[in-house]
Amino acid sequence: MLDQIILFPYWLTLKLRNRMYNRGFILKSQKAELPSICVGNIAAGGTGKTPHVEMIIHMLAGIPEWCGKDVAVLSRGYKRKSKGFQQVMEDGSAAFCGDEPLQIKRNCPTATVAVHNDRLEGCRILAHPDLLSDPKHARTVDKTFPRPEIVILDDAFQHRKISPDVNIVLVDYNHMPDRDHLLPLGRLRDLPERLGEADILIVSKCPAYMTDEEKVEAAARAGVRNYDCSTCEGERRNGARQKLFFTFIAYESPRPVFEGADTRYVYSKKAILFTGIAKDTPLRRYLSDSYKLVRTFSFPDHHAFTKGDLRSIDSAIKAWPTAAVATTQKDACRMRDCKKNVSPALQERLFEVPIRVEFLSPEEKSEFRETLAGLLRRS
């Protein structure tokens, strides 16, 4: 109700836009030429879309119909400096293609990863790679890739021009939409009612263990009533059935960002942490179990590190010369871009902390796989 009063013009614009797309009146959505899965959210960042995209890539390999098939990921490449359609290469730069697409490519090297602001046009190019021979695509650097048989659309839930075959929408367990507000009062960039349009809802960043009662309560806050933990299904207010799953973030062992790093620093009892992500509290908690965090630096999401930032980190290294330096995979992508400005002291002790998505139980994971496979067969 607060959004409808204080932010009425924004609320009304979203309401009308969604209604016109849903009814095909003036604004129309189109199917991609390739089978497509959208992984999105209704909030401004921080729900874990990137590791969920990676999880789905790996999961497709375990579905008989998709095992061995070429998979593509299409993203807009937020804050990239390149234009038009570009393929993401493992040795590419975050400045060229965006830090999240680069992370996906490095974690899933067999997938084709591409960026384009227009998801519909991007899918058309993926389906017809020969289109890149047109002079209008002269800026495209790497034009050779296998024609994929399925495409995962990263953060395309608000890109209504394209209608995916499967819509997977994430909500953050720590910031549920029922108590959030539209930007700028809150973090929502779309109306909570749109959660009902998802084929699958995922409550992400959950505790590693939840009771059935806690799951039912969380599902209700996401708009899913009468949630059945055994079938992972409940119903929306309009009576429509909806699948809902719970995932958490699992951290892996730190690994060097730069070649030649001294792995002995991993065993230090002290650590310096710097991040440029939406929320770094979970990572701080994880590292605090093994290290005493002597200094932390929190930069804005997708932050481009400056010489001044690097000097500040170097100053912390001088103050705690035995401490390791930790960061996220996404930040490591951007750090490699500015390697020439990174001091030898920082290069030898800088480690990234990889993450992966896990379901709360093997049964949930199996049910998610079967649900995804069934939705793709239906499309």
Image (spheres, rainbow, N blue to C red):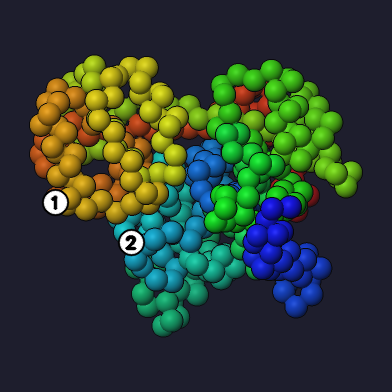
Identify the amino acid type marked 1: Lys
Q: Which residue sits furthest right?
A: 239
Instruction: Residue at 84% x, 39% y: name it.
Output: 235
Q: Between residue 118 and residue 184, name the one nearer to us.
A: 184
**Residue 158 shows in the view:** yes
Q: Residue placed at 29% from the left, 38% from the top?
A: 297
Q: Please give the residue where the numbered disc 1 appears in the rendered image.
A: 340
Left or right: 214 in relation to 295: right
- Which residue is at the front of the view, 363 or 81? 81
Residue 163 point in image, percent of width and height: 69, 61
Q: Which residue is mark 2?
A: 96
Q: Earlier in the sequence, mark 2 or mark 1?
A: 2
10 Å crowding of disc 2: few (<14), some (14-19), many (20+): some
* Residue in view at x 54 percent, y 56 percent: 184
Image quadrant where residue 290 sits: top left
Secondary structure, mark 2, is helix
Against 140, residue 327 (above or below) is above
Counting from the top left corner in percent of width and height, residue 173 is at 60, 34
Using the image, determine if residue 328 lies above or below residue 147.
above
